[in-house]
Image (tube, rainbow, N blue to C red):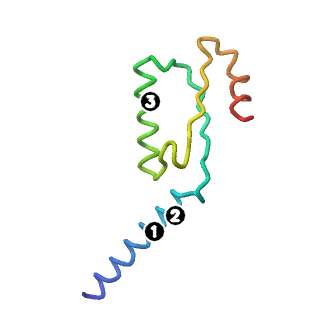
Amino acid sequence: MSRREFIVLVGGAATAWSTAARAQQSGQIRRIGVLQGLLPSDPEYQRRTTQLTEGLRDLGWIEGQNFVFEFRYPEGRFERLAELADEVIE
């Protein structure tokens, strides 16, 4: 193994270890609050939620393992957004 190959191997291992360590987040399950104007039955809602979940997965976050979503819906009454935001924060 050449010196260059060794350096690449060690650098790659360090990067992988660092990414895995950040993804674990000390075993604590995080809560992500989402205020959503669309209802779960809406195809656009489903598309957005899937993209968000996949994007987080690409960063090492797995729903149910190290985070959960807390969804709130104003159901067409957008004046409720502040109330729903307070509910998620509590």
Q: What's the residue at 47%, 45% (across, down)?
A: 56
Looking at the image, is mark 3 or mark 2 earlier in the sequence? 2
State how far apart marks 2 and 1 are (Cα): 6 Å
| x and y percentages locating residue 39 in the rendered image | 51, 18
Task: Indicate the quadrant where residue 51 lies.
Answer: top left
Q: Give, as a three-letter code, the residue at label 1.
A: Trp
Q: Is residue 90 depicted above or below 4 in this figure? A: above
Label 2 near label 3: C-beta < 8 Å? no
Q: Are marks 3 and 1 in contact (CB under 8 Å)?
A: no
Callout 3 environment at 10 Å: few (<14), some (14 to 19), or many (20+)? few
Neighbours of disc 1 within 10 Å: few (<14), some (14-19), many (20+): few
Query: Which of the image's four quarters has the N terminus?
Result: bottom left
Q: Position of residue 62 (x, y in %)?
A: 47, 47
User: Which residue does the image show at 38% across and 78% down from the upper left?
Assistant: 10
Q: Look at the numbered disc 1 and give the secondary structure of its residue.
A: helix
User: What is the number of the mark on residue 52?
Assistant: none
The residue sitting at 56% across, 24% down in the picture is 36
Callout in the foreground (3, 2): 2
Q: Which amino acid lies under the numbered mark 2 shown in the image of this protein?
A: Ala
Q: Which residue is mark 3?
A: 48
Identify the secondary structure beneath mark 3.
helix
Q: Position of residue 3 (x, y in %)?
A: 30, 88
Secondary structure beneath dot 2 equals: helix
Residues under labels 3 and 1: Cα distance?
Answer: 30 Å
Q: Amino acid at mark 3?
A: Arg
The label on residue 21 is 2
* Picture disc at residue 17: 1
Judged by depth in the image, the label closer to the viewer, 3 or 1, is: 1
* Residue at (47% x, 62% y) in the render: 20
Tags 2 and 1 touching, CB below 8 Å:
yes
Q: Nearer the viewer, residue 30 or 10?
A: 30
